[in-house]
Amino acid sequence: MVRLILESEGDIVSLIRSAEAESIVVVVRPSANALWTALARAAIPPLAIERAPGCRVNAVFAEEGARDADVDAAADFLDRARSTTGQIIDVRPPALG
């Protein structure tokens, strides 16, 4: 698996197109720019189709306050889910109380 970290305002298309692996999981960090987040989210399914069948592309969108262990667990799950591509898991911070 190649785990790619996409920082706010990064170019998700170039990041995924340049990676070489059987499984790519993009971890998308929180952004204050809602339009950029929506565009990054919308790019995952078509990029998964473009890279198939030799490569699976999935993403984990980490919200502000999400625990690193939860983000890692989601990325590991997507990597092991061998029939899964083009999927997104949202990781939220733990509930208070």
Image: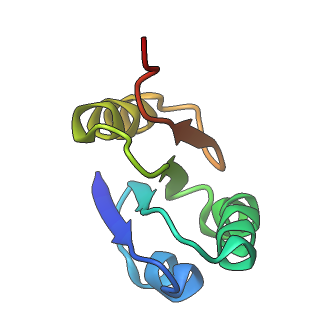
Residue at the farthest top position: 97
Colour mode of the rendering:
rainbow
Q: In the visual, does 79 lie left or right of 8?
A: left
Pinpoint residue 54: horizontal percent, then vertical percent: 51, 58
Vertically, is 10 above or below 20?
below
Which is more toward the observer, 95 or 20?
A: 95
Taking the spot 75% from the left edge, 77% from the top edge, the residue there is 35
Which is more toward the observer, 52 or 84?
A: 84
Vertically, is 52 above or below 95?
below
Residue at the farthest front position: 97
Pinpoint residue 57: horizontal percent, then vertical percent: 54, 56
Q: Quadrant of the C terminus?
A: top left
Taking the spot 49% from the left edge, 36% from the top edge, the residue there is 92
Residue at the farthest left position: 69
Pinpoint residue 6: horizontal percent, then vertical percent: 41, 72
Q: In the visual, does 14 lie left or right of 20?
A: right
Taking the spot 56% from the left edge, 38% from the top edge, the residue there is 89
Taking the spot 49% from the left edge, 49% from the top edge, the residue there is 63
How many numbered discs, if any? 0
Vertically, is 12 above or below 56?
below
Pinpoint residue 43: horizontal percent, then vertical percent: 71, 70
